Image (cartoon, coloured by chain):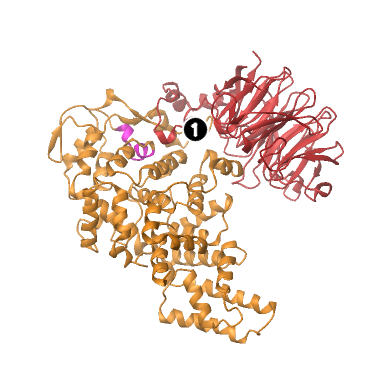
């Protein structure tokens, strides 16, 4: 395999997953780029630890109350063999942002994540219907208070503004008609569940999960006019109309581009700021329309496109991408433990608390991830974990670097190999010179013996810490 | 079996009445109920609570309240059992030891942390005590049962990893019948194995599945005086009762009602009580990705959700401890 193949597949796995270990990279290289894309798009078994063992080793995950729920999801991200399945769930979680602090029971949020895993690659129409029935979304956007004759516009507004079309593509009347169509789409025991949520009640017997209920007696079955069409529309009809709008195709395409290809401006600016790459958006729009809104088909076009292949390191890692990618590399989280809760907290300190987005708008991405405080946390986290030679994944990295020419290896070769296994990562001339300066300590390490090997390992450790502290490592 | 009552209420603190994450119960000779509260997220919160059948709160011990004294600190407690002298034996799969307390909660001894009898424990889980006060301790990670004399000497061990007779895959609960035969919940092999008190294999019941006589990760087993084998079918979120010959007898799915503590709480939180009275807490329909016993249990308050332990008291009442519902459902012989 050429170094170009390695670059491309590493790039693909950083975007469609959370990076690769050396072993994974070898396997994907043997598959080739296009076959790897297909494997990622058609996940089979995640092959991570099954729930029964997870629940026995960490029974709190069974109840998934409080910090156990995001830790439960993060553990799956760290250990999955189907990384795009987790990544697509993370993508939709950012688009259909639902915060568990309003939900009383984070397991309901985890159930939503599972729905994203199951439906996230399919037709956008089906996904929007599932989303509209999702108990977490219903409570989050108050659709349990959207009644016949007394509408609550909240979900009707957001499904248009933030979930499908974007500002400027519909009227205030469309919002009202949309809300009317979703009356009766509620959860069972809505009053009791909403009250428990408001009071954050855990009594008497801990939290109760929720399920969707359609109440025909509370549904407004009257004639509605929505986006220029008229009929006795129910929620399913509204979704069908939404999904065949050109604006929806462009909105979905731009979201996919922003998440998988390159950072865009925040969503609220999309109606006034053109896309970074209009031709790329057009390609994705065409794929959406020609495939009858099939997300898997759109992603296939995206990952095989030239604009994707030319977008290496064009995005800033989100905090959860940085944390999960680091922990996958270090191999230190092979069984569920309290460490996963702490790792999720670390991402929180960096500005992203999964399952607790700041608003229905989700997170602003790109440069907004970087502040003076979050940058220190990002550097410290990566440096602490990837600079720990006791972690099995780090030990593998060091042994790989030393696998050839251990006795005659040069400072320049050590730097190059470190950059290769941590990316492969291209760095600026200044960064490279700094690394070479540190690596030059090799010249004063005695030429033989066990202590030489230990000293070289320490040198590699220092270089790894420097590289993961670099500006370049913040990009994906 | 006939449903009798529910004991407990959810607690968010390791102190006072209620359960944080109940894992097992046992009974002192005076009838007091001892219940494990287990918490990994908040280190030092694991404890043992003492209460009566009528939900009179008596107290608790453990949770590292004597910080300088590690004897009272529990890491990951799994199971408890009383011997004939009213000593309580607790397995801790975090510290890999057994701790012994009297019926007042006073520390007596600890075995295993310094390499018990030259062998040590690896993941001590279920524990049972025979009529001679010998201990049978399941070791999850060693896939074996360890028999220990009343004075703490290792007598013998049996079992290894595998699926054949006498082999185990992450075993968990253990119990003895009136003849001191040993029943082991062979957790990841989805079966119950029966042995003599010398560890000789007698029979095995069950296979993987959701049907009658099938299990999904059985975590606990107990045998009543008629020889019926009662199994916490943990992964199927139910209890399964087998006849003495191992044939299927019945399922229990859970019928929880409001406990005394729950009623007391609701009576001073009237808004929730009123809303609750107007609700129908039985589920109707779930989307395909949620039609599993786990999700049904999570959505239906009266059904079992995390039924981790089954125990019988001196009156042969059956106590089913549910870690994720913070309660114990009690059944009586019908």
Q: Is residue B197 left or right of residue A441?
A: right
View extreme (bottom): residue: A444
Q: Residue B137: x percent and y percent?
A: 75, 38
Neighbor class of circle 1 (other Cα within 10 Å; few <14, some 14-19, many 20+) is: many
Q: Chain of mark 1?
A: B
Q: Is residue A146 left or right of residue A333?
A: left
Residue A292 sits in quarter: top left
Q: How many marks?
A: 1
Residue A437, relative to residue B177: is it above or below?
below
Residue A76, relative to residue B11: is it above or below?
below
Q: Residue at x 64, y 34 (%)?
A: B219
Magenta stretch containing residue B17, yes or no?
no
Residue B267, relative to residue A282: is it above or below?
above
Q: Residue A281: x percent and y percent?
A: 23, 58
Looking at the rendered image, the quarter that the C terminus of chain A falls into is: bottom left
Residue B123 sits in quarter: top right
| Chain in red on the image | B
| Residue labelled with disc 1 | B298
Q: Residue at x 22, y 35 (%)?
A: A237
- Per the rendered image, the range of residues in magenta is A136-145
Q: Residue A154: x percent and y percent?
A: 28, 40
View extreme (top): residue: B334
Of B179 and A128, the residue lying toward us: B179
Q: Main secondary structure of the magenta part?
A: helix
| Chain in orange on the image | A
Q: Is residue B147 left or right of residue B22?
A: right
Q: Residue at x 44, y 32 (%)?
A: B291
- Residue A370 visible in the displayed image: no
Of B319 and B155, the residue lying toward us: B155
């Amino acid at each position: 395999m050429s170094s170009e193949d390695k670059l491309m597949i590493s790039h693909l796995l950083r975007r469609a997953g959370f990076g690769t270990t050396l072993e994974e990279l070898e396997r994907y290289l043997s598959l080739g780029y296009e076959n790897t894309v297909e494997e990622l798009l058609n996940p089979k078994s995640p092959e991570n630890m099954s729930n029964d063992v997870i629940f026995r080793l960490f029974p709190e995950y069974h109840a998934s109350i409080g910090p156990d729920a995001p830790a439960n999801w993060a553990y799956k991200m760290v250990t999955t063999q189907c990384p795009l399945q987790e990544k697509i769930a993370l993508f939709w979680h950012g688009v259909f942002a639902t915060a568990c602090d309003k939900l009383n029971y984070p397991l309901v949020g985890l159930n939503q994540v599972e729905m994203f895993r199951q439906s996230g690659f399919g037709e956008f129409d089906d996904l929007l219907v599932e989303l509209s029935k999702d108990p977490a979304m219903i409570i989050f956007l108050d659709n349990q208070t959207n009644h016949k004759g007394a509408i609550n516009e909240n979900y009707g507004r957001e499904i248009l503004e933030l979930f499908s079309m974007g500002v400027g593509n519909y009227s205030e009347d469309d919002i009202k008609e949309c809300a009317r169509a979703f009356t009766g789409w509620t959860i069972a025991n809505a009053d009791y569940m909403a009250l428990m949520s408001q009071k954050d009640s855990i009594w008497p017997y801990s939290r109760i999960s929720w399920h969707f209920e359609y109440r025909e007696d509370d549904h407004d079955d009257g004639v509605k006019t929505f986006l220029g069409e008229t009929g006795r529309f129910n929620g399913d009809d509204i979704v069908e109309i939404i999904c065949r709008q050109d604006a929806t195709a462009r909105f979905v395409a731009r979201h996919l581009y922003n998440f998988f290809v390159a950072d865009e401006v925040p969503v609220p600016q999309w109606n006034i700021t053109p896309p970074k790459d209009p031709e790329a958006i057009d390609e994705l729009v065409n794929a959406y329309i020609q495939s009858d809104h099939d997300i898997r088909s759109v992603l296939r076009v995206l990952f095989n496109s030239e604009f994707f292949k030319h977008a290496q390191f064009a995005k800033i890692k989100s905090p959860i991408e940085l944390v999960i990618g680091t922990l996958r590399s270090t191999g230190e989280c092979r069984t569920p433990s309290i460490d996963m809760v702490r790792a999720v907290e670390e991402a929180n300190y960096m500005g992203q608390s999964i399952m607790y987005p700041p608003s229905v708008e989700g997170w602003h991405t790109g440069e907004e991830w970087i502040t003076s405080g979050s940058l220190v946390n990002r550097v410290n986290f990566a440096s602490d974990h990837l600079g720990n030679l006791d972690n099995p994944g780090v030990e593998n990295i060091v042994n790989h670097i030393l696998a050839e020419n251990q006795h005659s290896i040069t400072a320049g070769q050590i730097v190059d190999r470190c950059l290769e296994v941590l990316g492969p990562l291209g760095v600026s001339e200044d960064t490279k010179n700094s690394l070479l300066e540190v690596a030059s300590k090799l010249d004063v390490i005695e030429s033989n013996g066990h202590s030489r090997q230990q000293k070289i390992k320490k040198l590699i450790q220092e270089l790894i810490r420097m590289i993961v502290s670099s500006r370049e490592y913040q990009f994906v | 079996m006939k449903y009798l009552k529910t004991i407990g209420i959810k607690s968010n603190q390791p102190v006072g009445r209620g359960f944080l994450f109940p894992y097992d119960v046992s009974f002192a000779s005076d009838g007091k109920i001892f219940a494990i509260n287990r918490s990994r997220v908040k280190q030092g919160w694991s404890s043992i609570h003492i209460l009566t059948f009528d939900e009179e709160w008596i107290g608790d011990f453990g949770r590292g309240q004597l910080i300088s004294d590690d004897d009272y600190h529990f890491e990951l407690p799994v199971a408890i059992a009383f011997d004939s002298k009213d000593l309580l034996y607790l397995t801790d799969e975090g510290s890999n030891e057994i701790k012994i307390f009297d019926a007042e909660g006073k520390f007596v001894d600890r075995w295993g942390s310094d390499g018990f009898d030259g062998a040590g424990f690896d993941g001590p889980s279920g524990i049972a005590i025979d009529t001679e006060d010998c201990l049978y301790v399941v070791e999850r990670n060693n896939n074996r049962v360890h028999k220990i004399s009343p004075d703490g000497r290792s007598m013998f061990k049996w079992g290894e990893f595998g699926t054949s007779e006498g082999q185990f895959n992450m075993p968990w609960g253990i119990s003895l019948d009136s003849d001191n035969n040993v029943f082991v919940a062979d957790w990841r092999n989805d079966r119950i194995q029966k042995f003599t008190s010398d560890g000789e294999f007698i029979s095995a019941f069950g296979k993987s599945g959701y049907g009658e006589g099938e299990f999904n990760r059985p975590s606990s087993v107990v045998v009543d005086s008629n020889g019926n084998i009662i199994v916490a079918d943990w992964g199927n979120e139910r209890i399964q009762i087998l006849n003495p010959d191992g044939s299927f007898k019945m399922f229990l799915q859970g019928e929880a009602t409001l406990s005394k503590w729950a009623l007391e709480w609701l009576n001073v939180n009237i808004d929730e009580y009123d809303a609750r009275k107007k609700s129908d807490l039985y589920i109707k329909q779930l989307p395909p990705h949620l039609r599993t016993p786990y999700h049904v249990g999570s959505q239906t308050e009266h059904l079992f959700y995390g039924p981790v332990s089954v125990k019988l008291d001196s009156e042969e009442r059956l106590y089913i401890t549910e870690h994720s519902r913070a309660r114990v459902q009690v059944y009586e012989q019908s």
